[in-house]
């Protein structure tokens, strides 16, 4: 069976928290145009409500906790997302979500630690001496509602690589060691 999927987002959507409501209202019309499925943007909390969802802050927050200055994500609240998905199901549309679990580009606290630049074609080959960078090592303070449901994250090498990509465009990096201050 061949299905036709609509990408129901693009990079420059308005930062109005109404995208899930628009999808709920559009679901029947989308199906009527011959689409079988919709592909949705990342629903998780990003570093701000202006981010399209790829600078992930909290993978457990779909727009229900007051973090990073708002409860909603760029696209709306968890309740709005659930209502939009229900409308899609009612319209007999499949729903695909661009779930980004490997980006940790935002955080609450950073610290300095040592890294070594590696060859982009062979990550086993060091091409620099160790040097200091600053990267996020604390990713969110759990809202009271979540305190007993999730444990704290440690260092994210994805965040380290993201930080380094911004400082030296096009280069690959690997964490050589991390100094957290706990050994002192």
Image: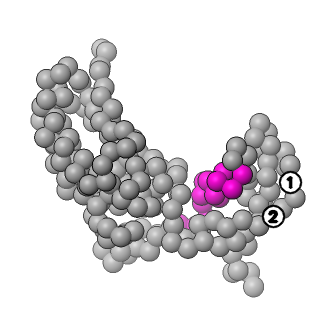
Q: Is residue 123 left or right of residue 91?
A: right
Q: Is residue 68 left or right of residue 163?
A: left
Which dot marks residue 131?
Answer: 2
Residue beneath disc 1: 128
Q: Is the residue marked by circle 2 packed among few (<14), some (14-19), or many (20+) residues within 10 Å? A: few
**147 w.r.t. 73: above or below:** below
Q: Residue at x 22, y 51 (%)?
A: 18
Residue range highlighted in magenta: 153-168
* Residue 42 is a magenta residue: no
Numbered disc 2: secondary structure: strand
Q: Are marks 2 and 1 in contact (CB under 8 Å)?
A: yes
Q: Residue at x 41, y 54 (%)?
A: 51
Can residue 124 be seen here? The reply is no
**Residue 76 location, quadrant:** bottom left
Tell me where residue 13 appears, x and y as whole percent.
32, 45
Q: Going by the picture, which residue comes out furthest to the bottom? A: 184
Q: Nearer the viewer, residue 28 or 51?
A: 51
Tell me where residue 120 appears, x and y as whole percent.
75, 41
């Amino acid at each position: 069976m061949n299905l036709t999927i609509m990408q129901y987002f693009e990079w420059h959507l308005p930062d109005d928290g109404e995208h899930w409501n628009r999808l709920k209202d559009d679901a029947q019309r989308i199906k009527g145009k011959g689409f079988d499925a919709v592909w949705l943007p990342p629903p998780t909390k990003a570093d701000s409500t202006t981010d399209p969802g790829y600078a992930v802050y909290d993978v457990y927050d779909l727009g229900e906790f007051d973090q990073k200055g708002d409860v909603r994500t760029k696209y709306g609240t968890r309740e709005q997302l659930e209502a939009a998905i229900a409308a899609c199901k009612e319209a007999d549309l499949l729903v695909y979500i661009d779930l980004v679990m490997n980006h940790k580009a935002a955080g609450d606290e950073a610290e300095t630690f040592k890294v070594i630049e590696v060859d982009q074609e062979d990550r086993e080959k060091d091409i620099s001496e160790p040097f200091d960078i600053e990267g996020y090592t604390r990713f969110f303070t759990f809202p009271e509602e979540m305190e007993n449901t999730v444990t704290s994250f440690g260092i994210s090498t994805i965040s380290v690589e993201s930080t380094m990509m911004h400082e030296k465009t096009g280069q690959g990096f690997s964490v050589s060691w991390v100094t957290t201050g706990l050994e002192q």
